[in-house]
Image (cartoon, helix red, strand yellow):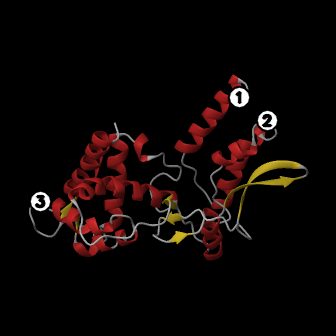
Amino acid sequence: MNLSLTFALFLLLSLHSCTTMGGRAQRRQRQAEERLRPYIGRVEPEKLCELLKCHSPVGSWCQVVQENGVLIPKCVCPQSCPRQRAPVCSVLGKTYGNECLLHKEACRKRRRTGLAHIGPCLVPKAKCTEEELGQFPYRLMDWFLLLSRMGESYTPGAPPQSCLSHTQRTQLAQQRFTLLDKNKDGKLSHRDLRKLRYKRMPLEHCATPFFQSCDRNRNRKVTLREWTSCLVDRSEAWFYHFMC
């Protein structure tokens, strides 16, 4: 692959990751496929699959298929899956034998189910350790990004959390707050927080002590200021301490 083609692919990936596309899923899918069309036959189809975001059919994933004698990347719903044992955990907290099985069920139920992480879902522990509590806000922000990729909010082609700026993290936290604040009083109650469905995510046993720590004045309400401070400041503090 020559330098100019590599640079073009880099620009393509950047646009793919940072551009919000509107309209219906079918139109977004056609747009995504059109971006890759000039590179078919010039770049390995497996590499192109890494760039193709699947919007339609719902729940599909990219696979290399043959059309008119040419290998192309295409979003498909798996009809069958290999018996290979490679467990993955979905954003809904369910373990699948491999990623193919995850997408097969997602297509059958016609829903977008994100991949939370490689490996089986973690089994909750009885007690949240101090180390886990420090990691929890970063995990929660990461989970919000996974939900956004399922089309619930934020940017559909959201970059990894490690690439987010402070402003982007704050926007993500604020948008999730707005979604949860059903009565629009500017505060989240314990009833609102239950709608987070955090019981389906890893380290869920740390959720209650974490939100209690966010409630600075102990009035059983979490304000937007308390929310963003807990999520953004503490997630960034954990990341820069342990990852940088």
Looking at the rendered structure, the secondary structure element under dot 3 is loop
Give the camera-side residue of 205 and 165: 205
Say whether residue 21 is left or right of residue 243.
right
Task: Report if the CB atoms under discs 1 and 2 are less than 8 Å apart.
Answer: yes
Q: What residue type is labelled 3?
A: Arg
Residue 186 is at least partly visible in this image: no
Location of mark 3 (residue): 216
Helix, strand or loop at label 1? It is helix
Sequence order check: which comes first, mark 1 or mark 2?
1
| Residue carrying label 1 | 5
Amino acid type indicated by mark 2: Arg
Q: Around disc 3, counting alpha carbons within 10 Å, would you say few (fewer than 14), some (14 to 19), or many (20 or more)?
A: few
Task: Judge left or right: residue 157 versus residue 30.
Answer: left
Above/below status of 92 relative to 149: below
Q: Earlier in the sequence, mark 3 or mark 1?
A: 1
Q: Which of 217 and 120 is in front in this view?
A: 120
Above-or-below relation of 201 to 71: below
Image location (x, y in percent) of residue 120: 48, 65
Q: In which quarter of the image is the N terminus?
A: top right
**How many neighbours does mark 2 have within 10 angstroms: few (below 14), some (14-19), or many (20 or more)?**
few
- Residue 98 x %, y %: 60, 65
